[in-house]
Image: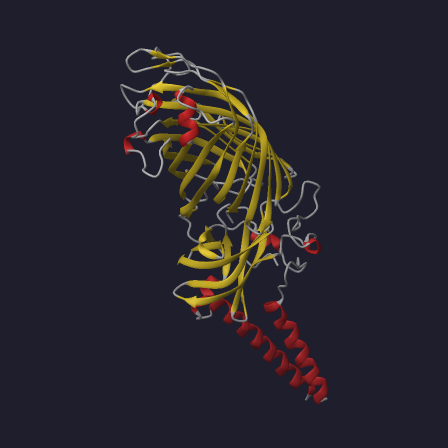
Amino acid sequence: MMRHFLKLTTAAIVLTSTPVFAQTDGTADDDIDWSLYEDLGFEDESMKRYANAKIEGLSPAKLISIGYDFQGSYSIAPGDLTMADGTTVEGGDAMQVNSTAGIRAGFNLPVISQNNLVWQMGANYWNTSYNYAEAPTSSDNPLHQTLSEHGLRTSGISTTIYKPLDDTQFILFQGSADMSGTYGASAMPAQYLKYSAAALWGKRPTEKKQWGVGLARTYRVGELNYIPVILYNKTSANNKWGTEALFPARVHVRRTINPRNMVFLGYELEGQSFRMYENLPGFDLRDEDLEIRRGEIRVRAVYEFSLKNFIWMSVQAGYRINYRYDVDRLVSGPDIYRAFGLLDSPNYAQMNMLTNPFYVNISVNLVSP
Amino acid sequence: MLRKLTFLAVSAVIAFGTLSFDLQQKSEDPGDRLVGIWEPSNGRSRIKIDRIGNKYYGRVVWLIEPNDPDGTPRTDINNPNPDLRNVPLRGFRMCKDFVYQGDDQWSEGTLYDPNNGSTYQGTITMRDMNTLDMRGYIGVEAIGRTDVWKRLKMPSRKKK
């Protein structure tokens, strides 16, 4: 009888105690009434839900990136250069550039990451060296010798602020200050900084779509412009396809092989205004009043994949199409705003022609969790 | 005699069950303030955090989209381990092994993101009784992302 009693007691204790420890990894427990968790309000009823900054399926954000950019062979045909006194230096012959290459590094780290505010700060450094087939001499156009000797560099800082207004609407602000030019070890004066910014209002109607409209101050086509921008990110129902676009700066169609392997097809506009800042005697193009307005379109395919955990590699290959490589003389202010030729404005001091090469870009990235 | 013993045993069992339930619900262990139902910032899921032993675990109890377009329950299709890709997401334990460190902080645990199949080291900081900072990071805490989770009301038990 006592045995029977002990058995009964043990069985009862085991049966009643088990639910406390019943959860197991990944096991959908049929005994759980999942509907209990459907209609739950916040404990603190003053709390709100906010639109998330990301959508499902979006490619991971790059926190730290180190890469190398390489453009193949092309030619530069310089136009006539108008000097400060109004005289003209003849453009001269086109010269062959075997390659244009350089390091591209950057980071972008979150400062504040909350439901109702995301703030990130970043910095970047891009170097471009021009490797001529034959070293330019003083008899060639000064543009060639300047590029060959000094190359071009861009370094800058940036900030991104994402502010959701409610569970669907948001405001996005991006701003940057860049120093671009022929400068070497000694940085250029801060007066030559170029400021870019974009502000958008948008909606995130579903977990797989967000869009926005706004205005940007940009140097992406080489010179200052104010243009409307459209944000459009979308992921298909089966997560295999998507669009990542900030038109007109970049537009890509995404094919997600799996969340660690993605292929993109699209283009990006790249550009900046490069100050010819050199305190050395010599070529007129080193005049501090001159800036190269470089703008290019990169039509490309990109493959991004996880090497290990959060270390990703990005390999892109495509065709670099020159949009502008002209020189402005800035004598009455830091910029000339032409509004794509709609406004009456000074002519370029030099207009140059570039042929278009293929290019590759490889980078290793630490991506965001 | 057997009746008496059975009655005593059943009474003891009920008392034990009630006591253990009360311990779970009203523990004075400060780490147990983490126990409850929480909603991540994207509002796509709800996570129930329980204490098992001296560690805390979070399990997916609700998904905004519980089923795939074909009507079958969503599974962990992005899991790096192919053998686990058929495991249902609802019920999945995505927070593991968190240990209370004092000062409203839990650490030594991991966070799993079913959206990409990645597992992060994690720390949890309770900002107030109804708000958690869930930080997933890679190696060092500086390289990571914080998601803010909000406490939800406990469900009514009347349904089941």
Name the foreground residue: A180 vs A75.
A75
Query: Is residue B152 in sight in this rendering?
Result: no
The answer to whether B79 appears left or right of B157 in the picture is: right
Q: Is residue B33 above or below residue A72?
A: below
Picture quadrant of residue A149: top left
Quadrant where the N terminus of chain A sits is bottom right
Q: Which coloring applies here? A: secondary structure
Query: Is residue A101 in sight in this rendering?
Result: yes
Q: Where does the image place residue A47, in percent across and percent down from the top left? A: 42, 48
Q: Is residue A13 above or below residue A82?
A: below
Q: Where does the image place residue B48, in percent across and percent down from the top left? A: 54, 58
x 63%, y 81%: residue: B9
Total labels drawn: 0
Q: Where does the image place residue B6, in percent across and percent down from the top left? A: 66, 82
Q: Where does the image place residue A81, in percent across and percent down from the top left? A: 38, 15
The answer to whether B81 appears left or right of A312 in the picture is: right
Q: Is residue A140 above or below residue A310?
A: above
Name the foreground residue: A270 vs A17.
A270
